[in-house]
Image (cartoon, rainbow, N blue to C red):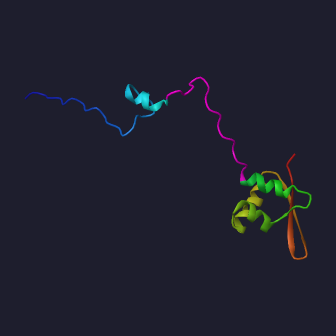
Amino acid sequence: MTDTVKPKRTRRFARTPNGEAPTGSEAALATPKGADLAAPAAPPPKAESKIAQVVALLQREEGTTLDEMVAVTGWLPHTTRAALTGLKRKGYTITSEKADDVRRYHAVAPR
């Protein structure tokens, strides 16, 4: 009996795998004409995070209410209160006071 070994088929991909550079006509499609290859484009500026917005509200002189934090972040009230707990765990000192049936929160950054 003779051993016959089938030749290995080459793998076909819908796109070029990350480890391989495009070749031939693929390279022409990958790089637009007139593109400056020496200077990479600057990344767009990152938006301020929601937790940073909450911290900014908490550090205002007048503090903030739960409704104001919910309006800025778009979170539900229980999620916003959980974020306050997370800030406590990060070392922020969070205080609250109730005046005229409205609770206002204040925060002091960790040292």
User: Is residue 31 shown above or below 87?
Assistant: above
User: Is residue 94 shown above or below 47?
Assistant: below
Farthest residue in the left direction?
1
Where the C terminus falls, by quadrant? Answer: top right
x 66%, y 40%: residue: 44
User: Is residue 37 shown above or below 56?
Assistant: above
Q: Residue 16 is drawn in which quadrant?
A: top left
Farthest residue in the top direction?
38
Where the N terminus falls, by quadrant? Answer: top left
Q: Position of residue 52 (x, y in %)?
A: 76, 51
Q: Is residue 20 visible?
A: no
Q: Which of the two residues, 5 or 8, is positioned nearer the viewer here? A: 8
Q: Position of residue 25 (x, y in %)?
A: 38, 28
The kind of secondary structure the magenta stretch mainly shows is loop
Specify whether residue 34 is painted magenta: yes
Q: Residue 5 is drawn in which quadrant?
A: top left
Q: Position of residue 28 (x, y in %)?
A: 43, 28
Q: Position of residue 58 (x, y in %)?
A: 84, 58
First to last magenta residue range: 33-49
Q: As drawn, is 76 to the left or to the right of 61?
A: left
